[in-house]
Image (tube, grey):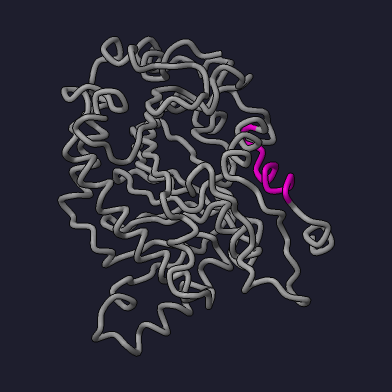
Amino acid sequence: MASKPIQALIEQLQIHQSLPQEYVQPQKIQIQAATGGAQIPVLDLSEFTSSAAAGGKEEFLRELDQACREWGAFQVINHGVPKDILQGMRNAAKHFYDVPVEDKMKYFVTVFDGRPMRYSTSFDSSRDVILEWKDVLRIPAEASALEADSVWPAKEHLPRDAVNSYGGRINDFVSVLLEAMTESLELPAGYLNEELAGRERILAINFYPPCPDPNRAIGLGAHSDATALTVIVQNQVDGLQLFHKDHQWVTVKMLPEALLVNLGDQLQIISNGRYHSVEHRAVVNKEKLRISVATLIGPAKSSSIAPAPQLVDKTHPALYKPVVFKDYLFNYIKLGLNTRGALQTIATAKTEAQN
């Protein structure tokens, strides 16, 4: 169990000191060089949103459908979020990291629970036997002036205007993207936005400090996200790896002003397995701090999620049982970073037959 952030440990380590034993991963998990040379698709959202791009819209939807089927992830350019908003969020994240550790300890928790603000280390440091090399601040993606004091760090520790501006713009982007996915799945207009009405949006600001032995540590273990989708920006330090269907780990080469979108388990359920959530992990390095800002988009906790009826027929039987999202989250957290564990708990016999 970790009683303090990685950042506090870093400040105590000598530059040549070996990796503490509680961070040494089993041999089968230790990181080898990523084997995949392919790169995830890059989609131009303006081809969907521009009235002048009528011919390009069909091509965009085809590429989106292919990316969701083959990768479960893609980068988006011309997404409508201004560069200054993206940089403002990156700066806000770095600002929080630079706050002295002793000043941030009042936010630090060791239990993975339902509190809206959680500054912690690893995945669930109260249960993890072997720890991940990261700290993370999890907060609501937006907060009103009345809410902010109870759900966000103090103003002097996290620039609130930058976070709110980013959160609002990402929500607008997600609404457009969900409509595009609705069209690519040939569902009724507004279907995915309605399924995710009242959606929960959590901002996970991940800090991966330089590591003395990166090949034997992991920043974030392999998993798929429990939510519907995740939108990511980062500083210019790569480290996110995706598992491609060809059984290769591929390091994502992020375009500077692009948004990365990872599909989560809820979209795999709603699409009845046509789209798949992507297994991913984060690796660390010896020289540079990596900061990743992930906005996790999920249904309201009380929502019941099931395959869209339009995607179920005799040829394509339902692969998943209906599930209330809060129950799915409970199983997901209970199982830990068990890549497909929570999905397996709601799989039907038809799912097993197809595997």
- The reply to whether residue 192 is visible in this rendering is yes
Can you say which quadrant of the picture contains the N terminus? top right
User: Is 166 a magenta residue?
Assistant: no
93 or 352: which is nearer to us?
A: 352
Can you say which quadrant of the picture contains the C terminus? bottom right
Q: Residue at x 29, y 58 (%)?
A: 172
Q: Is residue 14 above or below residue 246?
A: above
17 or 160: which is nearer to us?
A: 160
Answer left or right for 229 relative to 244: left
- The reply to whether residue 278 is visible in this rendering is no
Q: Quadrant of residue 259?
A: bottom left
Image spot of residue 141 (x, y percent): 32, 41
Q: Residue at x 43, y 22 (%)?
A: 120
Q: Quadrant of residue 27?
A: top right
Answer left or right for 133 relative to 273: left
Image spot of residue 60 (x, y percent): 40, 78
Count up the numbered dots.
0
User: Is 342 a magenta residue?
Assistant: yes
Q: Residue at x 28, y 64 (%)?
A: 79
Q: Residue at x 23, y 36 (%)?
A: 144
The residues colored magenta run 336-346
Q: Quadrant of residue 318?
A: bottom right
Q: Is residue 254 above or below residue 180?
A: above
Image spot of residue 189 (x, y percent): 44, 74
Image spot of residue 271 (x, y percent): 60, 65
